[in-house]
Image (cartoon, rainbow, N blue to C red):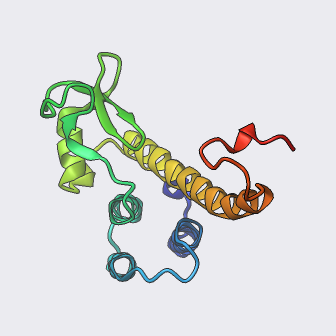
């Protein structure tokens, strides 16, 4: 946890290593991502200006997720498509957004602050949990994408040309 580290240099170093690892693991090899480069550049400027490191990282994570297509809906309840009510409680559902829930502690006003990147007004514990879930889903999607793209050519070479493409399992091997 960066909040308990006494050394600013250590916090910053680990934070930059973390961000670099995120980008390496989430981006396809040799991908050109001008928007992500600009986000990264902004992150470095904010860190250099001694902005709140924890919130700077969370802002980068959210912006990165949005840029990469892993973002989520901040405006509507995913169950009923009604606008987020600032006084209601919500639970985060990865890849989708927020769902009203009586047992949740994340309020509609927090979602609006998240959307507007007023992260200083969002409970840090919930903010970290949301970004962690969303990033984990990004890793899962990338692994699934890679495995499908790697396995599909291999599997297609294994299926004889005479096989019914509609139902390749029907072929007797």
In this view, 55 is above or below 108 = below
The quadrant where residue 46 appears: bottom left
Identify the residue at the far right of this view: 173
Q: Could you tell me how many numbered marks the image carries?
A: 0
User: What residue is rendered at 53% in x and 53% in y?
Assistant: 141
Quadrant where the C terminus lies?
Answer: top right
User: What residue is rendered at 42% in x and 40% in y?
Assistant: 94
Residue 73 spot, x, y in % from top left: 25, 45
Residue 160 spot, x, y in % from top left: 78, 56
User: What residue is rendered at 23% in x and 40% in y?
Assistant: 110
Residues 21 and 70: in front is 70
In this view, 136 is above or below 40 = above
In this picture, residue 52 sits left or right of residue 81: right
Identify the residue at the far front of this view: 162
User: What residue is rendered at 19% in x and 34% in y?
Assistant: 108
Residues 79 and 122: in front is 79
Residue 104 spot, x, y in % from top left: 34, 23
Identify the residue at the far top of this view: 102
The quadrant where residue 80 appears: top left
In this picture, residue 137 sits left or right of residue 34: right
The quadrant where residue 79 appears: top left
């Amino acid at each position: 946890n960066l909040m308990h580290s006494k050394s600013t240099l250590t916090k910053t170093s680990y934070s930059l290593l973390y961000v670099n690892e995120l980008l390496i693991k989430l981006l396809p090899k040799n991908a050109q991502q001008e928007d992500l480069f600009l986000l990264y550049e902004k992150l470095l400027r904010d860190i250099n200006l001694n902005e709140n490191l924890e919130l700077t990282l969370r802002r980068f994570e959210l912006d990165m997720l949005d840029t990469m297509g892993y973002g989520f809906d901040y405006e509507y309840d995913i169950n009923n498509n009604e606008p987020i009510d600032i006084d209601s409680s919500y639970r985060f559902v990865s890849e989708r957004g927020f769902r009203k829930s009586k047992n949740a502690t994340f309020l509609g006003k927090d979602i609006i602050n998240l959307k507007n990147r007023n992260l200083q007004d969002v409970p840090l514990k919930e903010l970290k949990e949301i970004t962690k879930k969303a990033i984990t889903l990004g890793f899962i999607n990338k692994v699934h994408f890679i495995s499908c793209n790697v396995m599909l050519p291999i599997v297609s070479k294994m299926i004889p040309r005479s096989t019914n493409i509609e139902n390749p399992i029907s072929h007797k091997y």
